[in-house]
Image (tube, rainbow, N blue to C red):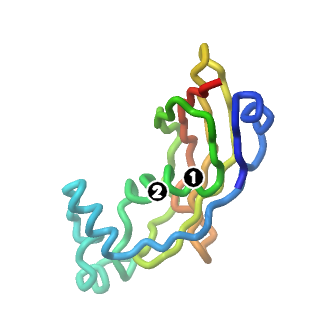
Amino acid sequence: MLTINNFAEFEAQVGNDLGASSWYKITQEQINKFADATLDYQWIHTDPERAKTESQFGATIAHGYLTLSLVPYLWKEIVKVENLKMEINYGIENLRFGQAVLVDSEVRLKVKLAGLVNLRGNIKATMATTLEIKDQKKPAFTGEIVFIYNFTA
C-alpha cells in the first residue's frame, strides 16, 4: 500500500499505476441490500431462479452502481492518504460499464493517477480506474474517478 502525506508526494505519482486492491466477492445478500437501499428491485438482480432461466447471464447480476459504489472501499486498500482535513467524492468522467458482474464474482480495482491539480489548497485528483472481474477479459467498468483532498499542511 502506498502512503501519501502531502501534495508533493501526490504530485510525484502523476502518471503512475498506483496498484490494485485485493479481490472482493459480490454476494446475493449484498445485491439484495443494495436493491433495498436504492429501491431497484429489477429481477435480473434480485430473483435468482428467474435469472437462472430467463436471463442471458444465467444468474443474477450486481447493479452497475453497486460495483461503482465499491470504489471508495477498494481505493482505501491501494493508497492511504494521510494528513487530511477532508476528502470528497467529486465526480466521475468517461464511465463505461463493460460487462455484467455475475453474483459470486470477484472484482478488484486498479488505479492510475491520471492527473492532479492544486486549486488553492484543494487538490483535485483524477484516477483512471478499472474494475476487473476475476477470470474475465473485459472489465466491469472503466472511468475516471475524481476526488478532492485538502491536506492539513
Position above or below: 146 against 95: above
Residue beneath label 2, please? 70
- Residue 143: x and y in percent read 56, 45
Q: Nearer the viewer, residue 82 or 125?
A: 82
| Residue type at the position of mark 2 | Leu
Q: Position of residue 52 (x, y in %)?
A: 31, 85
Left or right placement of residue 96 versus residue 9 in this view? left
- Labelled pair 2, 1 in contact (Cβ < 8 Å): no
The label on residue 17 is none
- Name the quadrant of the N terminus: bottom right
Across and down, in percent, residue 78 comes to 65, 54
Q: Quadrant of the C terminus?
A: top right
Q: Secondary structure at mark 2?
A: loop
Residue 103 picture quarter: bottom left
Mark 1 secondary-structure assignment: helix
| Real-space CA distance between mark 2 and mark 1, rounded to the nearest whole angstrom | 10 Å
Work out whether 45 lies above or below 110.
below
Of the residues shown, which amino acid type is indicated by label 1?
Lys
Determine which quarter of the picture holds residue 62: bottom left
Residue 7 spot, x, y in % from top left = 70, 28
Q: Which residue lies at the image location 35% right of the left edge and 61% below the top edge?
A: 63
Instruction: Please tell me whether residue 129 is drawn above or below residue 7 in the rendered image.
Output: below
Instruction: Tell which of 121 and 116 is nearer to you.
Output: 121
Report the residue that reaches farthest toward the top: 120
Which residue is labeled 1 in the image?
A: 76
Q: 16 or 77, which is in the foreground?
A: 77
Q: Which badge, 2 or 1, comes first in the chain's sequence?
A: 2
The one nearer the camera, 59 or 134, is 134
